[in-house]
Image (spheres, rainbow, N blue to C red):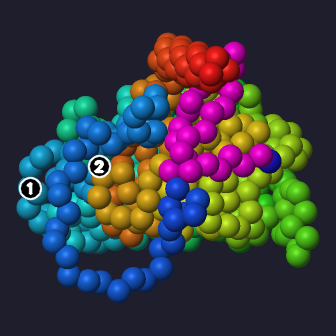
């Protein structure tokens, strides 16, 4: 893989057009910061953040990612405080635990994320044994699986708004209907610790990352039948197609499959038949390297987003693994992350959703597509050409003047 590292900006070519997709913002000497403990010192509070200016890359480049919103729980969405809700005696008999019993309904350690056709955001919260459903447009919050799930991790949504949920404790996959009822469960005979899941809607494949087994299980999304496995445990040589505690998976529009091979600090790509295609990444602290790659997603233009929970950022690559940009840093303010873990791309609204386990938060970002940004890139390209021509002409005049002396 070719990794682009600069102290200012990088240029890259997209389909048929030159794009200045992003600035590779550097920390120190082109490196990322780590999440290690730091001595706390008293300092004045930081100034308020103008979130309207949280864009990546920053001007004068053409922004492609814009911060939109954040949510910790129900109060952030509904705008109303919620009184502590007690379970009824029937709930207690059934073993139902409501998030609101521990105070205002808010997330504890959110992980997997998915978005349905209505733009609702589904977030798995393993400690609370359920899935939060954020309807931002209608300012409502609902739940899925409070009576069935124990440790929900990965989420995937199909084109009929059926929600697939991996349960790491019950080593099973749940399928919930659009109305929230359970349609079925499967995989208990084959899975040890299922984490990330993803759907290939065209081929009707459900990919399940079995982290403990170091392999990927492929099920038929409609019949729940196990189709095949691929992958095996890595040895010291870290051969292609092997894994060491993989965590998450994403599928692009061509049916290619991308796996975060977390303990090997890399991403591996496979075709729809499970044949190895390519891999990129290694341990490091510069753009294009990883420390703890976890969540992974693909946008409509084929860019691959990888969440690194140690760097607390999101790196974006093209489908060949070339580094394009990263956004985020360690922190709790908008646009920064603390133990970032899950990610999903909302294809309908071109939004990116990132979950953070340490602070129990999700953040939303707007993605500007290649097609939408193309006119601005062309305008910027003309400005650069004009500036270069003016500089060349000035140098020519200066040289002529020197020659005449």
Q: Which mark is residue 81?
A: 1
**Crowd rating for badge 2 (residues with CA inside 10 Å; few <14, some 14–19, many 20+):** some
Q: Is residue 140 above or below residue 5?
A: above
Q: Which mark is residue 399?
A: none
Q: Which residue is rendered at x = 25% and y = 56% of the image?
A: 73
Q: Which residue is rendered at x = 25% and y = 43% of the image?
A: 51
Q: Give coordinates of residue 258: x percent, y percent.
A: 71, 46
The residues tagged by marks 1 and 2 sit, at their Cα atoms, a distance apart of 17 Å
Of the residues under marks 1 and 2, which one precedes in the sequence? 2
Magenta region includes residue 387: no
Q: Is residue 360 left or right of residue 27?
A: left
Q: Give coordinates of residue 306: x percent, y percent.
A: 59, 51
Q: Which residue is rendered at x = 80% and y = 48% of the image?
A: 1
Tell me the residue that label 2 is attached to: 70
User: Which quarter of the picture shows residue 275?
Assistant: top right
Q: Which residues are magenta?
A: 2-25
Q: Is residue 20 left or right of residue 131?
A: right
Between 388 and 298, the one nearer to me in the picture: 388
Q: Is residue 63 left or right of residue 75?
A: right
Between 91 and 391, the one nearer to me in the picture: 391
Q: Which residue is rendered at x = 84% and y = 46% of the image?
A: 278
Residue 144 in sight: no
Does dot 2 land on a helix, a strand or a loop? strand
Q: Give coordinates of residue 241: x percent, y percent.
A: 86, 56
Q: Is residue 93 above or below residue 46?
A: below
């Amino acid at each position: 893989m070719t990794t682009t590292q600069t102290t200012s900006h990088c240029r890259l070519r997209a389909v048929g057009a030159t794009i200045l997709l992003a600035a590779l913002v550097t920390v120190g000497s082109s490196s990322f910061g780590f999440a290690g403990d730091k001595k706390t010192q008293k300092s004045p509070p930081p100034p308020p953040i103008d979130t309207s200016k949280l864009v990546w890359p920053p001007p004068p480049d053409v922004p492609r990612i814009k911060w939109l919103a954040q949510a910790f729980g129900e109060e952030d969405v509904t705008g109303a405080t919620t009184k502590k809700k007690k379970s009824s005696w029937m709930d207690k008999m059934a073993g139902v635990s409501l998030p609101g019993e521990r105070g205002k309904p808010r997330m504890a350690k959110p992980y997997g994320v998915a978005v349905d056709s209505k733009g609702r955001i589904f977030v798995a919260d393993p400690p609370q044994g359920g899935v939060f459903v954020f309807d931002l447009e209608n300012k409502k919050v609902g739940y899925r699986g409070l009576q069935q799930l124990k440790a929900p991790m990965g989420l995937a949504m199909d084109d009929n708004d059926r929600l697939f949920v991996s349960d790491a404790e019950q080593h099973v996959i749940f399928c919930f209907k659009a109305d929230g009822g359970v349609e079925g469960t499967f995989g208990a005979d084959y899975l040890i610790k299922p984490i990330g899941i993803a759907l290939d809607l065209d081929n009707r494949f459900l990919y399940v990352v079995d982290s403990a087994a170091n392999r990927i299980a492929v099920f038929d999304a409609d019949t729940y039948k196990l189709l095949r496995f691929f992958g095996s445990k890595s040895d010291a040589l870290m051969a292609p197609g092997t894994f060491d505690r993989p965590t998450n998976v994403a599928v692009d529009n061509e049916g290619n499959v991308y796996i975060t091979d977390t303990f090997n600090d890399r991403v591996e790509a496979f075709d729809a038949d499970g044949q190895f295609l390519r891999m990129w990444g290694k341990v490091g602290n510069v753009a294009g390297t990883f420390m703890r790659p976890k969540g992974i997603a693909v946008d409509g233009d084929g860019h691959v987003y990888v969440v690194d929970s140690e760097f607390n950022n999101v790196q974006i690559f093209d489908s060949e693994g070339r580094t394009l940009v990263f956004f985020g840093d360690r922190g709790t303010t908008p646009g920064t992350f603390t133990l970032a873990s899950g990610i999903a791309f909302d294809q309908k609204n071109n939004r990116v959703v990132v979950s953070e386990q340490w602070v129990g938060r999700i953040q939303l970002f707007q993605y500007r597509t290649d097609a939408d940004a193309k006119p601005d890139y062309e305008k910027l390209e003309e400005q650069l050409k004009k500036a270069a021509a003016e500089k060349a002409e000035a140098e020519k005049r200066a040289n002529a003047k020197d020659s005449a002396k």
